[in-house]
Image (spheres, rainbow, N blue to C red):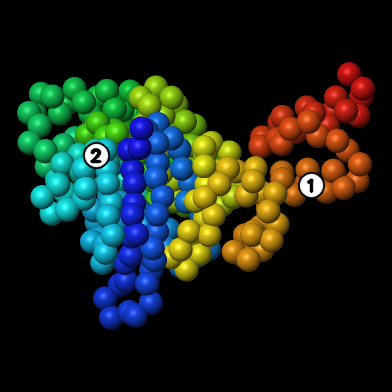
Amino acid sequence: MKIIETKNLNYSYTQSSIRSIENVNFSVLDGEWITIVGKNGSGKSTLIRLLGGLLKADSGKIIIDGLTLSEKTLWEIRKKIGIVFQNPDNQFVSGSVIEDVAFGMENYQIPQEEMLVRAQQALKTVGMIDFAEKSPVRLSGGQKQRVAIAGVLAIQPKILILDEAASMLDPDGRDEVWQTIKKLKEQQNLTVISVNHDLNELNLSDRVILLNDGKIAADTKINQLFSDSELLSKNDLKLPFLQQLQKDLRESGINFTQEYHHQRELVNFLWKSISGT
């Protein structure tokens, strides 16, 4: 079942004749993980802001969980969508972690007692309940993003949108965030849309949508994207290290039975190939 659908979507920023989003058509199934990629200025962040009702399209339709986005349905649709942005520091408004997680629920007039229960549950879900009374400014980058995710989960959305939510973190922090999202998707059957400029982090996605100058250049599976060197080149994208290494090894005569997206899996395969075990 489709939970998101866009039809002939167009958008231009004020005083610009160039469309940031042009005739975009795609759909997302309930429980699917879609990653939107593309070079800077391709329209990635603009598209997700349109989906979240933060920007109003010039023309076209956005349908979220059966509701066509409009002024009348905006509030109802926003209850279905949670957005986590790039910089976690810009999302904190309270003095303690649990107060911050509860803050977003105030807009939905949720009773105080229920807010506390939801906030505690959300923090448990992301593994941050022990930090409930801490100040957000004392957390690491990965911990801050997990708290930001908890704040979104507390409103119980069906769709989670991540706008480069791990791009400002170190490798450990990025892995912390992506593993948290993976667990949540599996446990709660969340639909996930992530914006990412790093092709190394696509392995959790079911599908990839490639944007170029506000248009969809490709809507495909990860392996198909990685195998199309011409498409990557046209869009100023480079193969992730693991995929480039496997490509080079194939050309040197090593046969692969599958594509490996994790370093450890590739190392294990190569070790067995070399040792003959």
User: Which residue is at 28% across, 81% downward?
Assistant: 15
| Separation (CA) of disc 2 from disc 1 | 43 Å
Residue, disc 1 = 247
User: Which residue is at 19% across, 22% downward?
Assistant: 117
User: Which residue is at 43% across, 35% downward?
Assistant: 32
Residue 208 position, x and y percent, is 52, 47
Q: Is residue 131 above or below residue 74?
A: above
Is 117 on the left or on the right of 72, as rendered? right
User: Which residue is at 92% across, 24% downward?
Assistant: 275
Q: Nearer the viewer, mark 2 or mark 1?
A: 2
Residue 61 position, x and y percent, is 27, 55
Q: Between residues 28 and 97, which one lies in front from this camera angle?
A: 28
Density class for disc 1 (Cα within 10 Å; few <14, some 14-19, many ≥20) is some
Amino acid tagged 1: Lys
Residue 204 position, x and y percent, is 53, 36
Residue 107 position, x and y percent, is 11, 42
Residue, disc 2 = 66
